[in-house]
Image (spheres, rainbow, N blue to C red):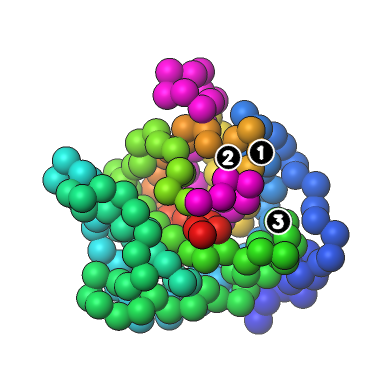
Amino acid sequence: MENPKDWTQATGAVAPRPTAEVRGASLHAGWLGPDAQAAIVADIREVVEAAPLFSPLTPWGKPMSVRMTSAGRYGWYSDRRGYRYVDRHPSGTSWPPIPDRVLAIWRAIVDAERMPDCCLVNFYRDGARMGLHQDRDEADFRWPVLSISLGDDARFRIGGTERSAPTETVWLRSGDVLVLGGAARLAYHGVDRVGAGTSTLLPKGGRINLTLRVVD
């Protein structure tokens, strides 16, 4: 059963203050407690059952080391045609809905005025990484990208709006929520590595990262 304190936080009317700022991104460290993390992992297992994880191809034909799927109106996708959002899983089925517990975090930290169209689910095994990139396939950059970390720690790197800008790293831990908005909305960012065995949340290890996005 979820910790009531976690869901009081996650459904509160007043947006919480971040615990730190990293290159303009707002970090809410430990936003989700252990019970809430486990409840969301159970929700994501249902998402993956309906829309199985897959390994997208980069436009250069190389499989990504991160496996992914999505929930919501759209899912993020990549192949030789490029990066984009699509309305169906590669199997041809519609994406499942975004879990209510995940949407509650967006309502609490961002705003209930405009809900996200996509929850991208990234699954990192030991050795998986995500190179520096911008999230710029969305139509309206006024809305932030909200990231939820579950499972093993990840060394997150963030810079500026130019790839050559200086970068800073921070370890994201299970239960942390990071918001890329404002000046950080188009910042280059990525995951250098995952600290295998740093969490017991996932029985077989690994890291789940959920990112909520307004697409249209």
Contact, CB < 8 Å: mark 2 with mark 1?
yes
Q: Which residue is at the front of the view, 33 or 96? A: 96
Q: Amino acid at mark 3?
A: Val
Cα separation, mark 2 vs mark 3, equals 13 Å
Can residue 157 be seen at all in this image of the molecule? no
Q: Which residue is at the front of the view, 164 or 154? A: 164
Instruction: Indicate whether residue 140 is drawn in magenta.
Output: yes
Residue underneath mark 3 = 110
Q: Which residue is at the front of the view, 27 or 193? A: 27
Can residue 184 be seen at all in this image of the molecule? yes
Q: Which x, y percent locates residue 52?
A: 30, 73
3 on left or right of 156: right
Q: Which residues are magenta?
A: 139-168
Q: Residues within 10 Å of mark 3 (few under 14, many from 20)?
A: many
- Vertical placement of residue 54 versus 157, above or below: below
Residue underneath mark 2 = 185
Callout 1: SS = helix
The residue located at (27%, 53%) in the rendering is: 78
- Vertical placement of residue 6 versus 1, above or below: above
Q: Which residue is at the front of the view, 47 or 205? A: 47
N-term-proximal mark, 2 vs 3:
3
Q: Amino acid at mark 1?
A: Gly
Q: Which x, y percent locates residue 109?
A: 72, 56
Q: Which x, y percent locates residue 118?
A: 48, 64
Q: Amino acid at mark 2?
A: Arg
Q: Quadrant of the N terminus?
A: bottom right
Residue underneath mark 1 = 182
194 on left or right of 117: left
Q: Residues within 10 Å of mark 1 (few under 14, many from 20)?
A: some
